[in-house]
Image (cartoon, rainbow, N blue to C red):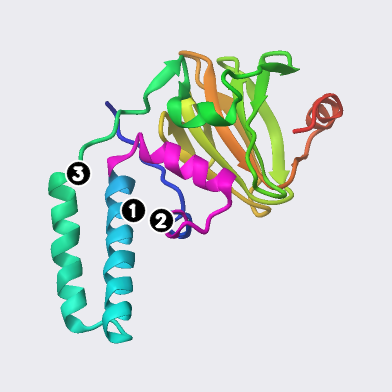
């Protein structure tokens, strides 16, 4: 198995481990963790930090030097005894089990554009939208930018843009500063989990035309 090379920003891993990330973002991070042992280990360490420091504060009113020693020991132990989770277990092609509770039992695929369909996920994140996108192999997304933040986790296939090449398990993070076009790989259709807080802003007439037909 090829390990992911593109990971969620560290602040999102921290927010997920602390339980303060919006549900849609936390769902994306949790799904990435089923595919990425590197980030699983990092989250284990963050969990250990939180547990040890909380215990120190409860016992002493502050974290002592002994607490930090215990932290190092606990982190190492957690790496040794942790059971590896199933690698992105699928109950249907391209859809990890982590997502099924948010799909109402099965993806309700809807046609978005020729070659593109989507399924919404029911999350409680106000102002953020989570959905699956299935995009035909070789499809090109015209040049666009973003009105807010967007996180994309590849579940099947892959795509490339000026910022990198993204395969199964990889996370692409974009914001208003990014202008790009994307091309799906030719080998197979691409399935992604996308979480954003605002629609994209097309920068070409083709993109604007497509945008009239779909809420991207």
Query: Distance from label 3 to label 1 (Cα)?
Result: 12 Å
Q: Do the CB atoms of the residues marked 3 and 1 lie less than 8 Å apart?
A: no
Q: Pick the quarter of the image with the C terminus.
A: top right
Q: Residues within 10 Å of mark 3 (few under 14, many from 20)?
A: few
| Residue at image mark 2 | 17
Assess whether residue 95 is covered by the magenta stretch: no
Q: In the image, what residue occupies the spot 12% across and 47% down?
A: 80
Query: Distance from label 3 to label 2 (Cα)?
Result: 16 Å
Q: Quadrant of residue 151?
A: top right
| Residue at image mark 1 | 43
Give the image location of residue 55, x and y in percent.
28, 72
Q: In the image, what residue occupies the spot 43% across and 60% down?
A: 18
Number of marks in picture: 3
Task: Provide the secondary structure element on which disc 3 rests.
Answer: loop
Q: Do the CB atoms of the residues marked 2 and 1 lie less than 8 Å apart?
A: yes
Q: Is residue 59 above or below residue 160?
A: below
Q: Pick the quarter of the image with the N terminus.
A: top left
The mark nearer the N terminus, 3 or 2, is 2
Assess whether residue 31 is covered by the magenta stretch: yes
Q: Is residue 199 above or below residue 55?
A: above
Q: Residues within 10 Å of mark 2 (few under 14, many from 20)?
A: many
The mark nearer the N terminus, 3 or 1, is 1
The mark nearer the N terminus, 2 or 1, is 2
Q: Is residue 67 above or below residue 91?
A: below
**Which region of the structure is painted magenta?**
16-37
Disc nearest the viewer among 3 and 1: 3
Query: Distance from label 2 to label 1 (Cα)?
Result: 6 Å
| Residue at image mark 3 | 82
Q: In the image, what residue occupies the spot 32% across and 80% down?
A: 57
**Residue 65 — which label?**
none
């Amino acid at each position: 198995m090829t390990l992911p090379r593109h990971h969620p920003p560290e602040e999102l891993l921290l927010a997920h481990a602390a339980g303060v990330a919006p549900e849609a973002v936390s769902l994306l991070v949790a799904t990435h963790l089923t595919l990425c042992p590197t980030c699983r280990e990092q989250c284990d360490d963050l969990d250990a930090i939180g547990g040890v420091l909380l215990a120190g504060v409860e016992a002493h009113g502050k974290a002592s030097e002994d607490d930090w020693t215990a932290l190092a020991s606990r982190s190492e132990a957690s790496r040794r005894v942790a059971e590896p989770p199933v690698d992105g277990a699928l109950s249907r092609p391209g859809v990890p089990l982590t997502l099924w509770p948010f799909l109402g039992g099965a993806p309700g695929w809807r046609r978005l554009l020729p070659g593109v369909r989507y399924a919404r996920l029911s999350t409680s994140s106000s102002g953020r939208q989570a959905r699956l996108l299935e995009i035909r192999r070789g499809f090109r997304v015209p040049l666009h930018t973003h009105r807010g933040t967007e996180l994309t986790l590849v579940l099947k296939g892959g795509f490339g843009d000026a910022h990198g090449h993204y395969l199964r398990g990889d996370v692409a993070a974009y914001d208003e500063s990014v202008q790009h076009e994307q091309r799906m790989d030719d080998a197979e259709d691409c399935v992604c989990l996308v979480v954003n807080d605002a629609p994209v802003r097309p920068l070409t007439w083709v993109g604007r035309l497509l945008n009239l037909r779909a809420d991207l």
